[in-house]
Structure formats: C-alpha cells, structure tokens
Image (cartoon, helix red, strand yellow):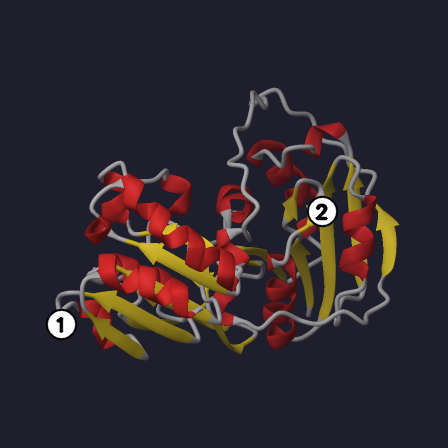
Amino acid sequence: MSILVLADLHEGQLAGATAHVVAAAKAIGGDIDVLVAGEGVQAAAAAAAKLDGVSKVRVADNAVYAHQLAEPMGALLVELADGYTHVLASASTTGKNVLPRLAALKDVSQLSDVLGVESADTFLRPIYAGNAIATVKSDDTLKVITIRTTGFDAVSDGGSATIEAVDTVVENSQSSFVKEELAASDRPELGGAKVVISGGRGMGNGENFKLLDGIADKLGAAIGASRAAVDAGFVPNDMQVGQTGKIVAPELYIAVGISGAIQHLAGMKDSKVIVAINKDDEAPIFQVADYGLVGDLFEILPELESKL
C-alpha cells in the first residue's frame, strides 16, 4: 500500500494538522508520501520531511498552487493519485474543498471526518453530530479520505524523508484568488490551542466576552464561542466551536454560559478535560464535563481570574 498525504499549510508554513494526518496514515500502514503544494514552500517541505513515518516529500512549487484553490489542487491530485491506494487530507477548509473534487474526478466515494482506522479499507467516522460512530468499508481501488485530526495524536519529528520536485503544472481558468481577510490575534489558533475557553449565549452580549480575556491570557488559551453566541452577533463566526464551526480537542476546554447543544458538543467533547460554568444545573454541558461549577458567571469569572 502507498498513501499520499496532502499537507496543510498556514501562511506558507507547515500546519500542525499535517502531523495528525500522517499519524492516521501510519495506522493504515504502508509507504507514506506527503504532498506540499503552494508557492515558496521549501521551508514547509523541509518540516514535512522531519515527520516520523514519512518516506518522501513531493513538492509542487508554483504560483498556480499559491492559495490551494480546489480546481488546480484537484487537477494536480488527479495526476498524482494513480500511484497510490489512499489519498488523505485533514478535514480542514482545504481538505474539505479539494478532496471531494478528486473523488468526483476519479469516480470513487469519499470517506469524510474519519477518526479511527480498523484496517486498510475499514474506518470509523461520526454520524448524527457525533452521537454514533459508523464503521464504513470502502471497496474502491483509490480511497479518498478526510481525517478528523482530533482523533489521532500527532507524530513526532525525527524523520529524514527525501524531497523531490513535482514538475506537474496544471492550467486553471475556472477560478481565481481575490482576497482574504485574516483575524489578527496574539492568542493561539483556535483549532490547535492546548487550552480553549468559550463563551455562549449566557455571556449576555459581545462586550461581556472581555471577561474571558484575562483568563485566556493567564492560561495561554484561545477564545471560542458557541453558535448561539455567534448567531446573536456577540462575536465573529471564526470563533465558533461546534459541528458547523471548528472541531477542537484541547488539553483543557472551559465552557462558560454554554448550555451544551448537541451541535456544540460535537465540536469539543473529545477535549481531555472539560470544565463547565453555568447557572443552570441541568444544562446538558454538565453531562460531558469533568468539572462543573453552578453559579453566576459574572461573579465566577472575576474570582477565577484573581485565583489564577
């Protein structure tokens, strides 16, 4: 078996999600190649070569791949996929954008959000917002899979894979990059943070989210939010944690004023330690919490910050 992993890039650098996808590839077994596609990605390729278990890093360095648009990336993968039994990517914006295109062009099924591997053709994935885990088997000769990175511990550095250039340059007349607007923050990126503190509808308004700032600063935490808080306009949607937001699994997750709707739980219940603060002692969030504190968050948060 041979596996191709599509590397995740963040501002031209190798994103941490890639190490989790390589871990999933190791669970499948076989030779693992990593594809680094973009523009000016030599540093990312060097980082990928250090990941444990990687045999070869293939580098497609060209302006057409600069923003990893689905059309050129899909065409590139179609050119490369014939030599592999599996193509994997993280269930990130890029992976969810590119791999369905590859699957359609190769006329195979895609397996999405895989969080466990039973064998080379049998996998586990969540359904019903994570309330059930389906075991699915693929008979396709090429298995196209997006990986839920929270299901696999990242591989360590220590590898020494070879690096080779990919000369394939595809045409792209179907789409063009216009612009991107990035939220600037000194805090860790939400999807990869070791500590996350999230606020919900119980925060009352966007101004009250400042109560989380001091705690986040002391813990080195990222700040998230429930969909209810986002829909109410308290905070922007890039802070949303949940089934339709970001899937997180930090070492510590603190839920403040979040009732625990099923869609929110689907995005954070794999966290190692969950702390819930809510005035409703029957809130569903307490069913998954390791520690629960029933009380008024407007009294609890300042006291928690002072204790920290």
204 is higher (above) or lower (below) than 61: below
Q: Which of the two marks, 1 or 2, is nearer to us in this view?
A: 1
Q: Is residue 6 left or right of residue 130?
A: right
The reply, left or right, for residue 136 in relation to residue 19 is left
Q: Is residue 280 left or right of residue 35?
A: left
Q: Is residue 104 left or right of residue 166?
A: left
Residue depicted at x 26% and y 66%: 277
Q: Secondary structure at mark 1?
A: loop
Mark yes or no: residue 224 visible. Answer: yes
Q: What residue do we see at 51% from left, 50% from top?
A: 92
- Mark 2 residue type: Gln
> Residue 216: x and y, percent?
46, 57
**Circle 1 Cα neighbour tier, 10 Å, few/some/many (<14 / 14–19 / ≥20):** some
- Looking at the rendered structure, the kind of residue marked 1 is Asp
Q: Quadrant of the N terminus?
A: bottom right
Residue picked out by circle 2: 13
> Are dots 1 and 2 in contact, CB under 8 Å?
no
Residue closest to the eye, 282 or 167: 282
Disc 2 secondary structure class: strand
Which residue lies under the disc numbered 1?
A: 281
Q: Residue at x 48, y 53 (%)?
A: 190
**Quarter assignment of residue 281:** bottom left
Q: Position of residue 175 (x, y in %)?
A: 56, 23
